[in-house]
Image: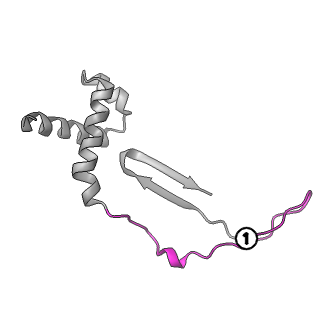
Amino acid sequence: MNNNKKEQMFALVAQWRESGLTRTTFANQHGIGTSSFNYWCKKQYNEVLKPQSPVKSSFPISSVKSPSFVELTSGSKLPNIPVVRIEFELEGGICIKIY
């Protein structure tokens, strides 16, 4: 594989990651086929980003106290239970939120 092309595509992928655009929109704006651009995004992630990014957490997992189960029946009000919110930010701009 031509190292120059790889460097060029990795630079475009890095530019896309900062752009806030979808892959399809970015690829179309740069005259690149969507499947080809997806290939380079995956390749760049596996070769560059994945090895550098260990799982990160903003809080120690052991500090989260799991709420106990509460039986709800028709017409019952929720007890005063603190809300637990977990967010996972993944590479490529994917965010998973659990409430």
- Mark 1: secondary structure: loop
Q: Is residue 10 magenta?
A: no
* Residue 79 locus on image (x, y percent): 80, 69
Q: Which residue is mark 1?
A: 81
Q: Is residue 72 left or right of residue 59?
A: right
Q: Is residue 81 left or right of residue 85?
A: right
Quadrant where the N terminus sits is top left
Relative depth, front residue between 59 and 36:
36
Q: In this figure, which colouring scheme has been used for the structure?
A: one colour
Q: How many marks?
A: 1
Q: Residue pushed farthest bottom?
A: 63
Quadrant where the C terminus sits is bottom right
Relative depth, front residue between 85 and 38:
38
Above-or-below relation of 54 to 3: below
Q: Residue pushed farthest right?
A: 75
* Residue 40 locus on image (x, y percent): 25, 36
Q: Amino acid at mark 1?
A: Ile
Which residue: 52% across, 78% down?
62
Q: Is residue 76 magenta?
A: yes
- Magenta span: predominant SS is loop
* Residue 22 locus on image (x, y percent): 38, 33
Which residue: 47% across, 57% down?
88
Task: Classify 10 Å Cα crowding around label 1: few (below 14), some (14-19), many (20 and above).
Answer: few
Residue 74 quadrant? bottom right
Residue 65 quadrant? bottom right
Give, as a single range, the part of the protein colored magenta: 54-80
Q: Is residue 37 left or right of residue 84?
A: left
* Residue 6 locus on image (x, y percent): 14, 37
